[in-house]
Structures are given as structure tokens and as C-alpha cells.
Image (tube, helix red, strand yellow):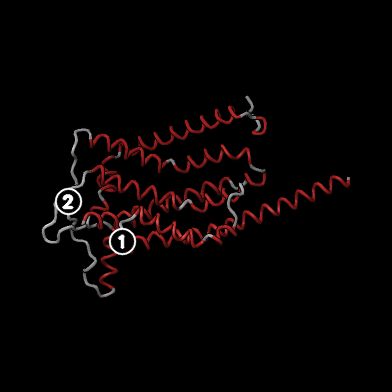
């Protein structure tokens, strides 16, 4: 059966189309989750264990930088002052499942973008559809860069700060966070990092539908700075260094988004002028 044109589809037809896109996205996530589920030794022994391991690459890089700047080993991490425990019989199994689903979402993200594009593509002009491959590649690239940023930058800062936070110097409470709380922290900073780096893509579509303009982004740049700092405070430990580390790339992405918004508006104006010329030409004929 031939696929209906988007202009001929009713609201229920669009819902039915959306339902099948969501079903395929769910299947893709479950396939990725299955891959993660059977590789639990690597997932938990390497990826999950990384930020709480003093030998993690981020800690080693910071230590080497500290030594090169003459701070000796002041910033080196030699041990983590906490141990992770489980408090329920089903903890490890349920965490295995939900962690696998999270990683399945990360693995399937390019396919998710492809399904999203397939859903919105019929509503776009022919000259806009040629950017589909770029949309998927750029969107996936930004997401994975954000995930890596969250895992290698935000997560170590968060784990080191929160795990070593002291209430009573010299006689503090023994820190034994549950595995659920530890993985929840990793999951939040990694997924948040990936989604934050999608800002240019979001601005692209908001500009396409007319909700955002380059002038709007410039006018509210200071407000955006405040929002960025608030987001940084939410997904990082409450220390200035961590918030600055997160805020800098986000502000950089915001500036890129302004250029993207300008490019979209310029193309829209060009297409409008072209359509007007075509209409005038057809009238003359």
C-alpha cells in the first residue's frame, strides 16, 4: 500500500504513524539493551566501576597536570573514601536491567534520530529533506560527545566531590552509598550531557517553526547564561570548578546555535524570494 501524503493524513493517521515509529524505537533500544545485558562484565567492571576507581584516566590526567604545574600530588586521587553496597535482594538484578536499558538508549540514539526524522520529513520541503543525513550524523555526533563529556568530565568530578564530602573533619560518618544511588548519579550526568549537547539541533528546529530567531537568542544571551549556570549546578556537584567546566562548552554550543539560527533564517528568506519569483513568472506566462 502506498504511503499517504502528509497533507492527506488525518490526525488519527498521524497518531498511527507516530505509534509505529515509537514501536520501532522501542525495539531498537531493547536490542541495544540486550547487547549491554550480555556484556555485564565489561559494563559494570569497566564502565560503571571507572569513575570510582582512583586509576581512572580522568584522575590520572588531572594528577599529571597538577605535577606539571608544580602542585606535586595535591590533586592526585589515591583512594575513594567510600564503598558501594546493596541493600535489597533484587538490587543487582534490577540495576542490571535498567542500566542495560540506559545503555541501549545510548547505542540506539542514531536510529532514534533517524525515526524522528522519518516522522517529520513529510512535512518538510524537498530542498530541506536533503539534510536528513547531516541531521542524523551531526545529532549523533553531538550526543556521543556529550555522553563522553558527562562520563569522563562531569562524572569523576561528581563522584570525587560527593563521595569525599566531609561533615565532621576527622570523625565523619562512614560513607556507604548504595549501588542504585551511584549508578543513578552516573546515568543522570551522562544522559544530561548527551542531551545538553543537542542544543544546536533543538535551536535548528525551533527556528524552522518560527519559535526562535537569531535576534531572540542574542537579546536573551544573559538570561541563557543564568539558565546554563542553573543547569550546571543541577547536574554537577555544588562547587564552582565543576559548574564552570560544564558551563563553558554549553555557552560555546549556544553561540553555535545563534549561527545555526541565522543560517536557517537566511535560507528561509532565500526560499521565500525564490517562490515569489516563481509565482510572478507563472503569472506573466
Q: Earlier in the sequence, mark 2 or mark 1?
A: 2
Q: Which residue lies furthest to the top in this view?
A: 1
Position in image of residue 119 (x %, y %): 56, 37
167 or 45, which lies in front? 167
The residue drawn where x is 48% and y is 40% is 112
Left or right, 66 with respect to 107, comes to: left
- Quarter of the figure that contains the C terminus: top right
Q: What element carries label 1?
A: loop
Q: Residue at x 33, y 64 (%)?
A: 241
Residue 79 spot, x, y in % from top left: 18, 58
Q: Where is residue 66 in the image (x, y as percent from the top left)?
A: 27, 70
Between 72 and 200, the residue placed more toward the observer is 200
For residue 171, which quarter of the picture?
bottom left
As drawn, the label of residue 239 is 1
Q: Which residue is disc 2 drawn over?
A: 175
Tell which residue pokes out farthest to the bottom in this image: 70
Q: Which residue is drawn at 30% across and 35% down?
A: 97
**CA–CA distance between discs 2 and 1?**
20 Å
Residue 23, percent across and down? 47, 30
For mark 2, give the secondary structure.
loop
Amino acid at each position: 500500500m502506498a504511503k499517504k501524503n502528509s497533507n492527506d493524513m488525518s490526525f488519527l493517521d498521524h497518531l498511527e504513524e507516530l505509534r509505529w515509529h515509537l514501536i520501532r524505537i522501542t525495539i531498537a533500544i531493547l536490542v541495544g539493551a540486550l547487547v549491554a545485558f550480555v556484556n555485564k562484565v565489561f559494563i559494570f567492571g569497566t564502565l560503571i566501576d571507572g569513575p570510582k576507581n582512583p586509576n581512572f584516566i580522568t584522575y590520572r590526567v588531572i594528577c599529571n597536570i597538577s605535577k606539571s604545574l608544580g602542585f606535586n600530588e595535591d590533586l592526585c586521587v589515591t583512594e575513594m573514601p567510600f564503598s558501594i553496597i546493596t541493600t535489597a535482594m533484587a538490587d543487582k538484578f534490577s540495576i542490571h536491567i535498567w542500566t542495560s536499558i540506559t545503555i541501549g538508549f545510548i547505542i540506539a540514539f542514531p536510529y532514534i534520530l533517524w525515526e524522528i526524522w522519518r516522522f517529520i520529513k513529510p512535512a518538510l520541503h524537498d530542498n530541506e529533506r536533503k539534510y536528513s543525513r547531516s541531521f542524523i550524523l551531526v545529532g549523533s555526533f553531538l550526543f556521543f560527545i556529550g555522553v563522553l563529556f558527562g562520563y569522563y568530565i562531569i562524572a569523576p568530578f561528581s563522584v570525587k566531590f560527593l563521595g569525599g564530602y566531609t561533615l565532621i573533619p576527622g570523625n565523619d560518618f562512614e560513607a556507604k552509598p548504595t549501588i542504585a544511588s551511584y549508578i543513578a548519579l552516573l546515568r543522570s550526568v551522562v544522559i544530561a550531557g548527551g542531551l545538553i549537547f543537542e542544543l544546536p539541533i533543538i535551536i535548528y528546529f525551533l527556528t524552522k517553526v518560527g519559535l526562535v530567531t537569531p535576534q531572540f537568542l542574542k537579546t536573551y544571551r544573559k538570561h541563557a547564561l543564568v539558565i546554563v549556570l542553573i543547569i550546571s549546578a543541577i547536574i554537577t556537584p555544588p562547587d564552582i570548578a565543576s559548574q564552570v567546566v560544564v558551563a563553558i562548552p554549553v555557552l560555546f554550543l549556544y553561540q553555535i546555535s545563534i549561527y545555526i539560527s541565522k543560517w536557517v533564517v537566511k535560507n528561509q528568506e532565500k526560499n521565500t524570494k525564490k517562490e515569489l519569483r516563481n509565482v510572478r513568472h507563472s503569472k506573466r506566462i
